[in-house]
Structures are given as structure tokens and as C-alpha cells.
Image (spheres, helix red, strand yellow):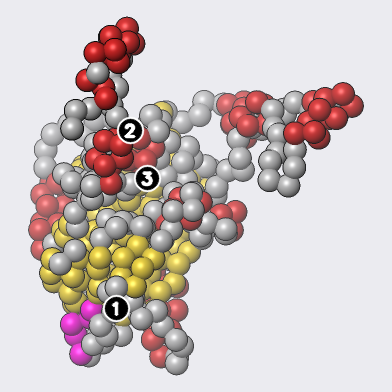
Amino acid sequence: MDSYLDDPRVQEKLALLNNDVLETTLYLKKGESRQAQPVIIKGEHLFPLLESLASASGDEGGSAGGKVISLVNKTAGPFEGIAPTLLCEIRALRPGQEAQPHRHSMAVLQYVLQGSGKSWIDGREFDWERGDLIVYPAWCTHSFRNTGTEPAYFLSVMDAPLVAAMGQLKVLPPEESDRAREKRQGMPSARYRDFPRVREAIMKLENEQLGVFTYLDSVDPPTSIDPVIIRWKSVKPLLDALLEVPVQEDPRAGRVIGFYNKKLADVRGVTPGLMAGFQVVPPGRRGLPHRHSVTAIQYIIEGTGVSTIEGQRFEWETGDIVVTPGGCAHDLSNRSESHPAYILGITDLPLMRYMRLLTVEEL
Ligand SMILES: [Fe+2]
Ligand SMILES: [Fe+2]
């Protein structure tokens, strides 16, 4: 059947708009059929690549620090992520090398694959070593340095594709003064309600569901999120303790712990867009198939197993990265009969929770 957009009377008016239009039903159909595909990045390819980057010549440019590349999933949409919401990058930093202080609109979870060093985040200093996860919230001024004797390698996950979709992807030099920080953290809010006539009019509009706020209330920045570090030497004993106690585990994923910033307790995020957690899968355990709206990037810290994602079989082992975009049916099993599998998981859960888009389905 012809589209109503082809009707000559509509055509004539459309020509005056001087703007592209699309039937909304077509737009929705296109969007619904968009499904990013799973990806596995094998550690046996990842680590030699990092080694070659560490010793490669060539301009490193900018304040990035070291050699850094993003792993792109071509099915993930226009913002060059490893999934529609998440960017995944690997970085090699030679001994003594550092990233100059800078800040950006993306939050970063930086996982230390190898090496040791220090990070400075909004004036705080953090020591890190292999297995640690460092949380850099959006807009924090940060720098880091490899203080060890071997190259440092990182796997970082950012909410960059989301931020890019909002048209807000920005990397800036550090804030030049305390005044700039004050400006970001507290703007005086208008108090229209101090005037009885205004208050009365507002009260007529407000009810249990609906509130009224002023422009200045809306641009007053929310509380900033603190940087944190999650140390592997403290996480591992917890995972091992969980393995031994007779707790009821998640039949889909084994024993899972997640971390959240206490300011974000309701959405379970270490930043508003990113969740970090670890799971331990007991030897021989087969997880139940399921599907959720949340995208997961898993780094295999130790172990061997297999995941079936959208019907594709992915065998994984220590050092591999497994990406399960939201909406993919998947399961996960530990192939070893004797060794547990330890896995780092980074997801976009908080934003999904906040937007009330979190769905989980048993299959
Ligand atoms: Fe950065
Ligand atoms: Fe899952």
C-alpha cells in the first residue's frame, strides 16, 4: 500500500517544511529490529596486541597517556561502542609513563590487567595493582602513572556511546580554578515559593504525582559522585568465602557481588551509567539460559567455560572478554570440574534501572 506521505497534498506541505520526515511507524520498526551482536575478544590476541602497543613507536597525542585503542563492535550502532551503551578500550602505559591531568564527560571503570601505579582523581591519590578496578566519575580531573618496572595494561569501560548519543562527548583540560568547581557544584536556586501569590498558584498545580520546579532548580548540578577503587586483594577472599558457604546462588550466574556508590544506592551504580561486579562460578556449574535488557562486558579473570549467546557458542578462558549486548539470550557454564571461574562484570544496569527499562526473562 502507498504511504500517506506520497499523497500529493501532503507532499506539497512537506516540501515547505524543508526537513526530512519519516513515518513514525517505520521509525519504530527500524528501531525494534536493531539488535547488537555478541563479541568475544580472546586474551591470546589481546595480550600480544598490548605488548606490541607498549613497544610501538609513533605519536601518542593528547593527554590520553600511553597507547590506547577502542574495541569496536560494528553491530553496536553509530557511536563505535563494543555495545550500544558501552565503550571498551585497552591501554598500554610504559614504566614511568603517565596520563596528564584531564577530565571528560564520560565515566570510566579502569581495570588493571597488568602492572602497578598511581591515579590522582579530584585531588585524591590511589595506588593500584593488577586486578584492581578504579572508578573515575564523569568530569573528575584525573591523571595516572605507571610507577612499576613492567608495562601497565588496562581494560577500561566507559559510558561514552550514551554520552555521545546525548551530544555531550567532551574531553577538557583540568579545571583551572576553584571557582570553576564552585560553579559546577552549587548554583543559587531561585526561591519563588517565598512569595505567597506564587506559592498559591504552584499549589494549585501540584498534586501527589506532579511537582513544579524552576529553571534554576533544574540546572543546579546534582551531588557529584566520588571516585573509588575496588581492590582485587579484598574482593577475592569474599568470592572464595561465597564459594564455601551454603548460600542460595543465582541459578543463572553462580555467586555474584556488585558494587555501588552509596549516593547511587537506588540504581546500584558506581556511576549513574555503570555498574561493577564480580562473579564466581563453581566448578562444573551450568547456568540457566536467560535474557535481560542490560548489556554485560565480562572479563575472565581466571577459569575456562562456555557461553551460548543468541545461539552462538563462545568458549572462553583466562584473559578473554565476552560482550553480551542487552536483549541477547544467553547462558554461561564453567567447563572445569575442579576450578572455579572468576569473572569481572561491567554493565549499564544503573541507567536501565533509573529509566525503568530493566527486564530479566528466564528462558
Ligand atoms: Fe581520562
Ligand atoms: Fe546474564
Residue 257: image x %, image y %? 44, 72
Q: Badge 3 is on which residue?
A: 159
Q: Earlier in the sequence, mark 3 or mark 1?
A: 3
Residue depth check, mark 3 versus mark 1: number of the one nearer the observer: 1
Find out whether residue 319 is within the magenta segment.
no
Q: Mark 3 and mark 1: span between their CA atoms?
A: 28 Å
Q: Which of the pair 273/363 is nearer the observer?
A: 363
Q: Which of the pair 93/84 is nearer the observer?
A: 84
- Identify the residue at image location x=17%, y=74%: 306
Instruction: State yes or no: Cβ of the residue under disc 1 lies below 8 Å from any atom of ligand 2.
Output: no
Q: Earlier in the sequence, mark 2 or mark 1?
A: 2
Q: Is residue 173 above or below residue 282?
A: above
Q: Badge 1 is on which residue?
A: 288
Q: Badge 2 is on which residue?
A: 24
Q: Is residue 313 above or below residue 152?
A: below
> Where are the magenta residues, as a range?
333-337
Instruction: State yes or no: Cβ of the residue under disc 3 lies below 8 Å from any atom of ligand 1.
Output: no
User: Dot 2: few (<14), some (14–19), or many (≥20) neighbours within 10 Å?
Assistant: few
